RNA sequence: GAGCCUUUAGCUCAGUUGGUUUAGAGCGCUAGCUUGACAGGCUAGAGGUCGGCAGUUCGAACCUGCCAAGGCUCACCA
């Protein structure tokens, strides 16, 4: 039998993965053994595998395979996330290429298209994970919009509403003018930008005097309803009771006095636009100001603006500066660095907007979730994330959970003709409650369900529970056996979005933590430390890498340079090292396979010593490896294996017991 | 603006409560090897006043203070 000199991962990996699958080696059923459970951080259903997924799932696979070898009953549960905004945007774009606009479709028609798209393109990533060798229990694959998971989300919403933790109200929210929906605070990314600081003159009504204010958003002057100065600022004291005229439209607005204003900053005079800035909004409430919303949902100006109606906010910014200049309202322009919020999904500049949304109160449920992390009931690896977690938890604000989208779980609130509403799991139950509470004569047609859906994270925060049906049937056998899960492997980017909220959900709905360890790995960057991005073109195709180096080669390469919490500077040469390692093992096998065994031959003294030495060495290394694993030092564990095989086993042991040329071995 | 983290060989990182470390690993590098498992290999070797300054100590990569560079998280200063 001829064994090729070089290892061929393609042949080997496909062969064994099929075999594993055929024999259901990864499938798990509750039994007498202790369980080891892990849920996958569900990737977007429309996503494709990128380097980050590859790292994330390789680490999980290592953990779960080790647990399997330790004879735990291992269950690694895979699945995908419906990713409301991202998926809806993709479907909208696809429809656009077919000449269909979303607005021309009914909700039902649109959802039909969305589901079609999901069936067709969804789950590609799961097939890619199989190529990677991921040992998931594929029979348990879940999707966050499966009927049972959706039901769980609705049940939880109703439960929280009944507990008084969910409320509906008009608040200043982060509005994405491109996705046309509200976002949570976490979905806003602040970036420092070089902006312009415009100094504008407002005429004082009935006088020749002017007052100068400074702003970065001149287009919002059309929504001004006051000018605010500090009560101790003598420069402006004489303006009490006077009014200023908004430039270009000459709407009179009052002066208000509040120590919120920083005397030193700008001119010490602040224009107040309650509809378009959270601070101004608060000032507006305090001083009883009118609120003039000058924007449409898509970021264009509406009739309230009086001028530039229908034009985009950024176009108007340019134009209004010209107008102000022409009318001698512009005093000067300075360069300034300020922080601007962008939508995490669409990269659109966020518009603070007053709107009616659903919120979840965070104060009560965040406290226990903070505690279990601080007292190490849930351990973070590396622990430096505890601080970051605490800071966020201590300052968290109510969570805006409604989204003006169709793809997702529709909010189970039903409005009555008189404006009242009821919250219930089904229309039938809603009707029942509505009749009881408001009017016996109501019919099902009188109820109108809320148009909005819930934030995707409002479903994925239940993931470790709902995949085992622990919300609907908390006493079911599987949930009792598999939950709480053991380890969670994810990126720090979603510590707040997901990890923190899963902890809250676990404690709130089941009184138990959802997992015991959270391993937070870094971001995969290129070898120059730059983030991988489409525009830079510096992200290798993971499947291409697997074809080139073998899945094991690539995975060894990634793990070797991946200490917990640190970013990984990816370089193809790492995969080469991994491939070479696989080849080394292959050739050790080739060597041994080539030996002829003579059972009658005495074992030489040297061989006996060699055997004892290696055995001792092996056990010592095993201890080291276990120690590394307990501390989630995967890279170190792998290096110990690497050296054990390459140096101790191949370079020393095999050489020591190697029989003379063409002689048999004992 | 607030909080946190990092800085050790060319690169990526270890270095556990300060003393068996004249500071380690992998990769890379240099010089030799067409050696019968493997050139995706073997052998030999070079490389660091542990970011800077000051201090504590008999003794500091490790503790303290200041400074410098890089990074992360949060934040309503127009």
Image (spheres, helix red, strand yellow):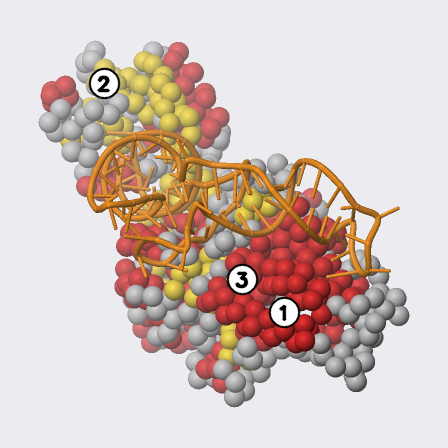
Q: Position of residue A576 (x, y in %)?
A: 69, 50
Q: Residue at x 62, y 63 (%)?
A: A648
Q: Residue at x 43, y 66 (%)?
A: A517
Q: Position of residue A580 (x, y in %)?
A: 71, 54
A138 or A64, which lies in front? A64
Q: Looking at the image, is mark 1 or mark 2 nearer the viewer?
A: 1
Q: Give me the C-alpha separation between circle 1 and circle 2.
A: 69 Å
N-terminal-most mark, 1 or 2: 1
Left or right of A15 on screen, residue A139: left
Which residue is disc 2 drawn over? A211
Labels 1 and 2 positioned on one and the same chain: yes
Which residue is disc 3 drawn over? A637
Q: Give me the C-alpha separation between circle 2 and circle 3.
A: 68 Å
Q: Residue at x 49, y 85 (%)?
A: A477
- Label 3 with label 1: CB-CB less than 8 Å: no
Mark 1 Cα shell of 10 Å, populated few (<14), some (14-19), many (≥20): many
N-terminal-most mark, 2 or 3: 2
Left or right of A273 on screen, residue A32: right
Which residue is disc 1 drawn over? A135
Q: Is residue A400 above or below residue A275?
A: below
Mark 2 Cα shell of 10 Å, populated few (<14), some (14-19), many (≥20): some
Q: Looking at the image, is mark 3 or mark 1 nearer the viewer?
A: 3
N-terminal-most mark, 3 or 1: 1
Q: Position of residue A271 (x, y in %)?
A: 27, 28
Q: Chain of mark 2?
A: A
Left or right of A236 on screen, residue A435: right
Q: Position of residue A445 (x, y in %)?
A: 47, 68
């Amino acid at each position: 039998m001829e064994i090729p000199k070089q290892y061929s991962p393609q042949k080997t990996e496909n062969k064994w993965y099929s075999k594993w699958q055929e024999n259901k080696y990864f499938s798990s059923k509750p039994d007498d053994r202790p369980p080891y459970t892990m849920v996958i951080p569900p990737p977007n259903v429309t996503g494709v595998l990128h380097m980050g997924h590859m790292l994330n799932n390789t680490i999980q696979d290592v953990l779960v395979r080790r647990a399997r070898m330790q004879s735990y009953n291992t269950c690694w549960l895979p699945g995908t996330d419906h990713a409301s905004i991202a998926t809806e945007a993709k479907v909208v774009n696809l429809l656009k290429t077919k000449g269909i606009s979303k607005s021309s479709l009914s909700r039902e028609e649109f959802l039909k298209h969305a589901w079609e798209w999901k069936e067709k393109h969804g789950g590609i990533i799961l097939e890619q994970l199989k190529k990677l060798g991921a040992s998931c229990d594929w029979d348990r694959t879940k999707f966050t919009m499966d009927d049972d998971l959706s039901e769980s989300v609705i049940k939880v919403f109703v439960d929280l509403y009944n507990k008084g933790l969910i409320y509906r109200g008009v608040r200043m929210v982060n509005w994405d003018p491109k996705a046309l929906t509200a976002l949570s605070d976490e979905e806003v990314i602040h970036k420092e930008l070089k902006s312009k600081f415009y100094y504008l003159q407002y005429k004082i009504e009935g006088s020749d005097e002017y007052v100068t204010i400074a702003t970065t958003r001149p287009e919002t002057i059309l929504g001004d309803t006051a000018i605010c100065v500090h009560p101790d600022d003598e420069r402006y004291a004489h303006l009490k009771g006077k009014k200023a005229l908004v430039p270009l439209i000459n709407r009179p607005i009052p002066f208000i006095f509040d120590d919120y204003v920083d005397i030193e900053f700008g001119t010490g005079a602040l224009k107040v636009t309650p509809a378009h800035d959270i601070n101004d909004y608060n000032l507006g409430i305090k001083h009883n100001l009118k609120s003039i919303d000058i924007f449409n949902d898509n970021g264009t100006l509406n009739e309230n603006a009086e001028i530039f109606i229908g034009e985009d906010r950024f176009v108007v910014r340019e134009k209004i500066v010209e107008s102000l200049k022409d009318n001698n309202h512009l005093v000067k322009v300075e360069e300034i660095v300020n922080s601007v919020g962008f939508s995490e999904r669409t990269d659109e500049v966020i518009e603070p907007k007053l709107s009616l949304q659903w919120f979840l109160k965070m104060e009560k449920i965040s406290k226990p979730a903070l505690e279990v992390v601080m007292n190490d009931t849930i351990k973070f690896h590396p622990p430096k994330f505890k601080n970051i977690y605490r800071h966020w938890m201590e300052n968290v604000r109510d969570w805006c959970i409604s989204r003006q989208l169709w793809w997702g779980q529709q909010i189970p609130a039903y409005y009555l003709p008189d404006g009242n509403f009821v919250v219930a799991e089904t229309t039938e139950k809603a009707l029942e409650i509505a009749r009881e509470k408001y009017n016996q004569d109501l019919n099902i047609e009188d109820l109108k369900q809320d148009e909005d859906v819930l934030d995707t994270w409002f479903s994925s925060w239940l993931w470790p529970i709902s995949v085992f049906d622990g919300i609907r049937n908390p006493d079911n056998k599987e949930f009792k056996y598999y939950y709480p899960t053991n380890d969670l492997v994810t990126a720090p980017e979603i510590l707040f979005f997901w990890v923190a909220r899963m902890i809250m959900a676990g404690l709130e709905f089941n009184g138990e933590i959802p997992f015991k360890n959270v391993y937070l790995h870094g971001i995969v960057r290129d070898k120059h430390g730059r983030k991988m991005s489409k525009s830079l073109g510096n992200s290798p195709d993971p499947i291409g890498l697997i074809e080139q180096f073998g899945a094991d080669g690539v995975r060894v390469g990634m793990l070797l340079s991946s200490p917990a919490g640190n970013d990984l500077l990816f370089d193809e040469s790492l995969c080469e090292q991994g491939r070479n390692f696989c080849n080394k093992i292959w050739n050790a096998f080739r060597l041994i396979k080539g030996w002829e065994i003579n059972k009658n031959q005495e074992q030489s003294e040297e061989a006996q010593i060699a055997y004892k030495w290696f055995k001792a060495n092996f056990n010592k290394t095993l201890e080291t490896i276990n120690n590394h694993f307990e501390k989630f030092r995967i890279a170190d564990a792998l290096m110990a294996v690497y050296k054990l095989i390459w140096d101790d086993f191949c370079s020393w042991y095999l050489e020591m017991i190697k029989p003379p040329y063409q002689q048999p071995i004992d």
